[in-house]
Amino acid sequence: MAHPHSKYADFETLRDQAVALRREGHSLRQIRDKLKIFNNDLLNRLVKGEPPPEWTKRPNAKDDLKAKARELRLQGWTYDQIQLELGCSRSSISLWVRDLPKPQPRYTPEERQALMHEGLARLRAAENEARSESKHAAHQDVQTLSARELFMVGVALYWAEGAKSKSYDRRERVTFVNSDPGVIETYLAWLDLLDVDRERPRYRVLIHESADVEAAHRYWAELVQVDTSVFARPTLKRHNPKTVRKNTGEDYHGCLVVTVARSAHLYNRIEGWWQGIVAQAQERLR
């Protein structure tokens, strides 16, 4: 059974499980073994505020603890294991069992390493599952995208990622660059919504010189449903030997540059739409 140990939402889930076990009368060690938690600090935080099992509160509990501690020590338990099991201080355990022989390590270095890797694998699996569930729930929140919503999304998307004219350098041309295929598809759907003729967009690949340029052309051509022959000459990024590239492999396709021909009027409309959005946002801030 996998249990997440992350410090975010998974911590609360794990705490609920630990508290439930504590209230059922489990010792710290039993909780540790059930939940596969091998970090003492984390384990104590999970049951913070929860009293130990009732048997430790008997009038002769201290004598019983001492006897139990000695018994466990003779079985080869470490101080940490005894502390987790009995819930008493390490200093008391040391005083009670110091005359007993030191036990052999419970695990070999190789076994400890294997346990650590196993725990990390469970943690990553739990985190991935939680991440997927969060994304799925958010996906469902969107439901149907209306034309009005797509219009607003497209304006904001262009103003975030598209080329913009400057007061000192007016270049009124609608040019959009991105490496995310979903962003490109959303942008093209927005252009369709604006009744931009499918013949007006021009395509060019921006990619590292060591990448497979032809494969990138095929990838983007299939995505935007055009023939590779319509692509302009690619722009190649020169390699800097002082840097280590991470954008490599079969999933790397560079960026697609989409330029709309004869788009000065469209650019000015986009700029006006964005100013309108900003004005409405400013009203909400007042």
Image: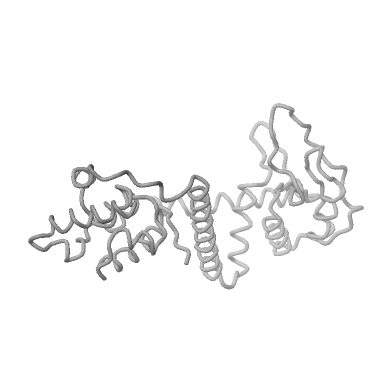
Above or below — where is 275 with respect to 21?
above
Residue at point 28%, 51% (across, down): 73
Q: In terms of depth relative to the viewer, which is nearer, 72 or 250?
A: 72
Give x and y (percent) for residue 39.
38, 50
Number of on-image labels: 0
Task: Decide: is 198 above or below 253.
Answer: below
Q: Which residue appears at 80% of the width and 46% of the height?
A: 205
Q: Which of 30 and 123 is in front in this view?
A: 30
Q: How is the image coloured?
A: one colour
x and y percent of residue 167 in the render?
64, 34
Q: In which quarter of the image is residue 247?
A: top right
Front-most of 250 and 60? Answer: 60
Q: Residue at x 81, y 42 (%)?
A: 211
The residue lying furthest to the bottom in this view is: 144
Q: Is residue 148 visible?
A: yes
Residue projecting furthest to the top: 242
Residue 207 location in percent, x, y? 78, 42
Extreme residue in the left direction: 59
Residue 193, position in %: x, y?
70, 64
Whether residue 256 is visible: no
Apparent side of residue 66 relative to residue 204 in the rendered image (left or right): left
